[in-house]
Amino acid sequence: GGRMAIQVTLKQPVVLEEVDAEILVIAGCALGVVSQGQPPHVLQVDEGTEMSQYGIKGDDFLVLVDGRDTRTMAQQEVAACLRTATTLTFERPKTALEGGDDQEPPAGFVGAAPEGALPLDGTAAPRARSRSRRRRRRGEPRKPAGTDGAAPAEGAAVMPPPPAG
């Protein structure tokens, strides 16, 4: 099967918040309950909560509550079952976005991803930081050189990073 199931054992008592007719929040995870026959899907998961520790992500589906199929439940039933639930089973749809590690995400996907959902934004930040540190270090020898009036030309020449990688 192309789907990945994730089992979550909830801490008791379960804290469930009904935001409105279509949104339930349980253990730091917002669920969208759109229509009967469709499993509730994860809208977002707050960092550091029970659900994030299980690796639940946006767009995962809540398929079972204590072994009961959510697709057969009305929204009120889903809420009622979640209040007393001990085990939830989520399924991650196998989509192009999820992909394997060997697949490049589509262009522009990083911007659309919820914050902190991808390792990409975590790894990009330190890289950018070190780049500016390198630029700063490179800028230091430029100060004494400026005394002979060649500062602008020299500064312009030093800006691009060296080709050696």
Image (spheres, rainbow, N blue to C red):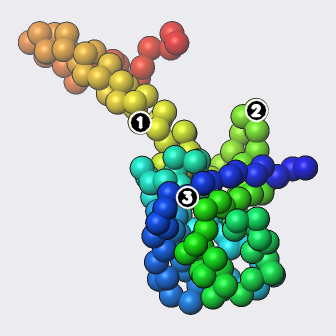
Quickly name the residue at label 3. 10
In the visual, does 57 lie left or right of 137? right
Q: CA distance from mark 3 to mark 1?
A: 34 Å
The residue at the far right in this view is 1
Q: Mark 2 Cα within 10 Å, few/some/many (few <14, many 20+)?
A: few
In the visual, does 47 lie left or right of 141? right
- Percent position of residue 75, x then y: 66, 86
Q: Tell me which label, 2 or 3, sits earlier in the chain.
A: 3
Q: Mark 1 Cα within 10 Å, few/some/many (few <14, many 20+)?
A: few
Which residue is located at x 41 percent, y 23 percent?
160
- Residue type at mark 3 is Leu
Q: Tell me which label, 3 or 1, sits earlier in the chain.
A: 3
Quickly name the residue at label 1. 125
- Residue type at mark 2 is Asp
Which residue is located at x 87 percent, y 50 percent?
2
How many marks overall?
Answer: 3
Q: Secondary structure at mark 1?
A: helix
Regarding residue 162, the answer to whether it shows in the image is: yes
Q: CA distance from mark 2 to mark 3?
A: 33 Å
Q: Residue 2, relative to residue 153: is it above or below?
A: below
- Percent position of residue 58, x then y: 60, 60
Asked if the residue under mark 3 is in contact with the one under mark 2, i.e. CB atoms within 8 Å, the reply is no
